[in-house]
Structure formats: structure tokens, C-alpha cells
């Protein structure tokens, strides 16, 4: 049962409540429906709405996004055109007006499409703990979660070169649907071969994953359907059944969507 909601005016104050056992509340689009449906122990929330964690900074190719920045803020920012298609694939406009960037990092699969994009962009998180702010790779947090009482305050990454970022989401509906397979990639092609690639995959395991074996297959090779087919078979994923797709179907269609993500066809 929900017993209190605190609304501190700073990140430090918010972390104090988290340390005492409260749960962080960003937009609440994932958390609140589950609290409303659940019966159990008492729950205290700390809202981040007034904690000074909203805003987007872009300077010399470096991007910093406040943890409480909404998905709609990212979608509408002309400095982040490569992220707009990704954000538009998430839920509906009313949800995107509430949901936050940091919140999307911690929703379970098959959600977290923006998190997949940020993982492909090698994002780093600013995490506030008892000793101050430290940097943590998103990849590490995606794999192991965030310790209780700590707070993500900002997400930082380097903007991709024009044409270097790819995003593709397969879903049962064009809008407002969880993912069947989500693929995000930052890729560089020089002299006809892949010179660098970072590939993030959603929907193919219970957490976001790097397709590191696929990256190894692609590196130094021409970006052709044949090479992509070999890359698609390289990683040992653990897909799952849910209301959107079966594990069998996810595994079956992943090679098709990897090709579509990387080649657009």
C-alpha cells in the first residue's frame, strides 16, 4: 500500500529518502500501475519532479540528459534527431509526456527501447551515492542493476556521426506496444567494410544485451546480407515467452530484423 510521496528539491535530498527505503518516482508510467495492482508491504515514494534533474545539454558532440527528462523532451529536441524514431516507437504521446529517460533504463524487457539505443551509444551514467557522483557504464548497470539507495542523475554519451546510428523495433502494433525484437547499432563503414560497431539488442533476453559475438563477425567485413546472417547466429541469446511473442518466434525473426536494422531492407 502506498503510504507517502515525498517531493524533495534536490538530488541529494532525494537520495536521503532512497537510502531510507523509498522508491524513486519519475513519470510513474511503469511503477504506478504495478503499485495499484499489487497487494503487499507499505511503499513510500520519492518524486524526482522538482529535484533539478531535467534538461538536455549538447556541446561539441557531447550529450548530457538529466535523469528526469521526459521522453517527449528527447523526441522534440532538434539536436537529437537520431533518437526521435526510437522515442516515437515507445507507448503513446501522453505516456511519453510523463515517462523519464532514467525510468526507461530500468523497465524490464520487452520495454526499454530508449535504453537499447543508449546502450548502443555507449552511454555512461552519473550515479549519486554516499560519496558523491561517480560514472558508471550503462552496460554495467543494465547487467547488474543499481544498488539500493543510489540515484542516476544524468546520462552522457557522444553523439553519433551522421548516418552511423541505426534503430529498428519489431512490435505487434506500430505504436504503443512492447517489443518483439529491438535492435540499436552504432556502426562505421570505411572502404566498404565495417570499421567499428556496437550492437544492443532488446527482447531477446530478460535484460538488455550487447551482441558482442555479432560485433566480432561484422568487424572488418562488408555489410552484406550474408555477413549479417552469420552475425545473427553468433550470439547465444535466451529469448522468452510473453503476451507479445513466444521465445521461438523471437529467435526465428531476429535475423530478419537484424538485417533490416543494419541494411534498412
Image (cartoon, helix red, strand yellow):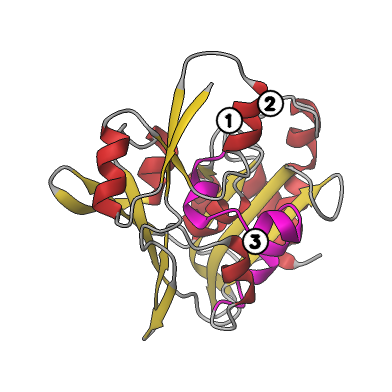
Cβ–Cβ under 8 Å for marks 2 and 1: yes
Residue 228 position, x and y percent, is 67, 55
Mark 3 element type: loop
Residue at 59% in and 27% down: 35
Residue 204 position, x and y percent, is 64, 36
Residue at 46% in and 56% down: 49
Above or below — where is 68 with respect to 26? below
Above or below — where is 253 with respect to 167? above
Tag 2 or tag 3, which sits nearer the N-term? 3
Please check the rendered image and state whether residue 55 is part of the magenta-colored stretch, yes or no. no
Query: 116 or 8, which is in the foreground?
Result: 8
Q: Which residues are magenta?
A: 80-107
Cβ–Cβ under 8 Å for marks 3 and 1: no
Tag 1 or tag 2, which sits nearer the N-term? 1
Residue 139 position, x and y percent, is 40, 47
> Circle 2 sits on which residue?
240
Query: 95 or 218, which is in the foreground?
Result: 95
Mark 3–mark 1 distance (CA, rounded to whole Å): 26 Å
Mark 2–mark 1 distance (CA, rounded to whole Å): 7 Å
Task: For residue 193, say whether it is visible.
Answer: yes
The residue sitting at the right extreme is: 173
Above or below — where is 154 with respect to 242? below
Mark 2 element type: loop
Picture quadrant of residue 55:
bottom left
Please check the rendered image and state whether residue 88 is part of the magenta-colored stretch, yes or no. yes
Amino acid at each position: 500500500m502506498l503510504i507517502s510521496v515525498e517531493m524533495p528539491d534536490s538530488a541529494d535530498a532525494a537520495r536521503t529518502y532512497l537510502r531510507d527505503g523509498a522508491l524513486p518516482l519519475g513519470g510513474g508510467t511503469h511503477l504506478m500501475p504495478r503499485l495499484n495492482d499489487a497487494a503487499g508491504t507499505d511503499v513510500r515514494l520519492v518524486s524526482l519532479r522538482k529535484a533539478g534533474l531535467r534538461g538536455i545539454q549538447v556541446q561539441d558532440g557531447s550529450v548530457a540528459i538529466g535523469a528526469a527528462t521526459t521522453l517527449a523532451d528527447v523526441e522534440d529536441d532538434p539536436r537529437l534527431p537520431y533518437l526521435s524514431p526510437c522515442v516515437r516507437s515507445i507507448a503513446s504521446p501522453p505516456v511519453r509526456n510523463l515517462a523519464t529517460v532514467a525510468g526507461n533504463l530500468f523497465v524490464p524487457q520487452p520495454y526499454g527501447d530508449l535504453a537499447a539505443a543508449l546502450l548502443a551509444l555507449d552511454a555512461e551514467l552519473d550515479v549519486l551515492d554516499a560519496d558523491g557522483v561517480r560514472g558508471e557504464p550503462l552496460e554495467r548497470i543494465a547487467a547488474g542493476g543499481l544498488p539500493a539507495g543510489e540515484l542516476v542523475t544524468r546520462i552522457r554519451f557522444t553523439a553519433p556521426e551522421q548516418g552511423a546510428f541505426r534503430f529498428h523495433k519489431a512490435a505487434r502494433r506500430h505504436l504503443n506496444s512492447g517489443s518483439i525484437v529491438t535492435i540499436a547499432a552504432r556502426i562505421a563503414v570505411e572502404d566498404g567494410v565495417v570499421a567499428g560497431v556496437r550492437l544492443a539488442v532488446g527482447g531477446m533476453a530478460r535484460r538488455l544485451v550487447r551482441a558482442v559475438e555479432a560485433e566480432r563477425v561484422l568487424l572488418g567485413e562488408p555489410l552484406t546480407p550474408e555477413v549479417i546472417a552469420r552475425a545473427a547466429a553468433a550470439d547465444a541469446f535466451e529469448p522468452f515467452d510473453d503476451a507479445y511473442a513466444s521465445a521461438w518466434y523471437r529467435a526465428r525473426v531476429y535475423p530478419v530484423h537484424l538485417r533490416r536494422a543494419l541494411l534498412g531492407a
